[in-house]
Image (cartoon, rainbow, N blue to C red):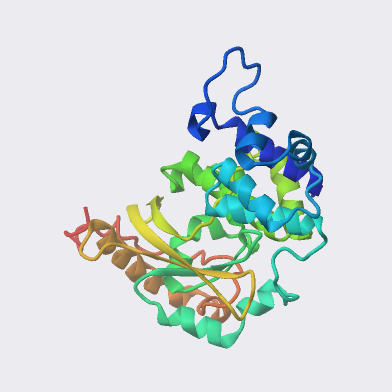
Amino acid sequence: MDNRSEVREFLTTRRARLTPEQVGLPPTRSRRVPGLRRSEVASVAGLSVEYYARLERGQIAGASSSVLEALARALQLDETERAHLFDLARAADGIPTSGRPRRRAATKAAARPSLRWALEAITDAVAFVRDPQQNLLTTNALGRAFYSPVIGDGGRLPNLARFQFLDPASRDFYPDWDRLAEMCVGVMRTEAGRDPHNRGIQDLVGELSTRSVIFRRLWSDHNVRTHGTGTKRFNHPVVGDLTLVYEELAITAEPGLVLLVYTAEPGSPSAERLRLLASWAATTVAAESPDQTSAGPLRGTTQARSTTPKEADADHPQFP
């Protein structure tokens, strides 16, 4: 990705969302474009107009930490946006932005026995490993059942971004599709800033930009975010509506990979449905090949036909 273009568009979109009143300046009339003028950003940041104009043209190489901090304050960047600005500046200086060592192949990392054992030990929650390119590398047993609409039957390496923007089934699986689409693109923007030379991310962005108008529009917004923690709603084809909270954990032994765990509030309808999904998943294990019964790298999903919790309501009166 072109660093100068990334810097220019990021700074331009950040100042476009602010008004003079928001940064303590008096309002002015006849503004031809929304947001702050360059001169106003420079004034608030304590920089010369000429220097800020140079920064916004993408010439950020050599900018000191104090300048970047002043710019972050002037543009009212949140922590994720501030980190993204520093990543862009380090990339312009030729410094590896992620600070990460050379990575092993993601599929080999996900196949490490101790990582698979850790996933298998999580039995009452959805747990999976994801790489910076949004590939779903490996899951626990409940995760395989939960993500069956994403994994599909093609034996491919599932990609959460491709599923979000290219598979019509995602509209059913994600009731809050628009919000999750913005989250997905924001996370990808953050990863691209951390590792601007990552060919996998570049190729994925190029593919989605070509094939999805919505992705292309969201990508041009230059919004960034981290996953961290939060709540998501799902409509699973087997058990129906689920409201789950998630925690994202960095896997320090495999820089770039993260472990995500989805759980339900104890005693809630979603917790009961998650339990029923686990029971349903257990009934399909015998029909799977040996390499699909563990939490190893994903190779597709079972095609076995078994009774679902929805079909077995008579045996499970507690299921809504």
Q: Which residue is drawn at 40% across and 77% down?
A: 122
Up-down relation of residue 58 to residue 107 (above or below) = above
Q: Position of residue 217 (x, y in %)?
A: 64, 34
Q: Residue furthest top?
A: 30
Q: In this view, does 7 lie to the left or right of 232?
A: right
Q: Which residue lies furthest to the bottom in this view?
A: 114
Which image quarter: residue 229? bottom left
In this view, the residue in front, 269 or 239, is 269
Q: Which residue is drawn at 34% across and 73% down?
A: 124
Q: From where the camera sits, is residue 60 visible? A: yes
Total count of labels? 0
In this view, the residue in front, 225 or 268, is 225
Q: Where is residue 137 in the image (x, y as percent from the top left)?
A: 60, 69
Q: In this view, does 95 lie to the left or right of 166?
A: right
Q: Is residue 235 left or right of residue 257?
A: left
Up-down relation of residue 217 to residue 186 (above or below) = above
Q: Where is residue 42 in the image (x, y as percent from the top left)?
A: 67, 36
Q: In this view, does 157 lie to the left or right of 168?
A: right
Q: From where the camera sits, is residue 214 visible? A: no
Q: Which residue is drawn at 64% across and 74% down?
A: 255
Which image quarter: residue 264? bottom left
Q: Which residue is drawn at 74% across and 34% down?
A: 49
Up-down relation of residue 118 to residue 260 (above or below) = below
In this view, the residue in front, 23 or 253, is 23
Q: Where is residue 101 in the image (x, y as percent from the top left)?
A: 73, 76
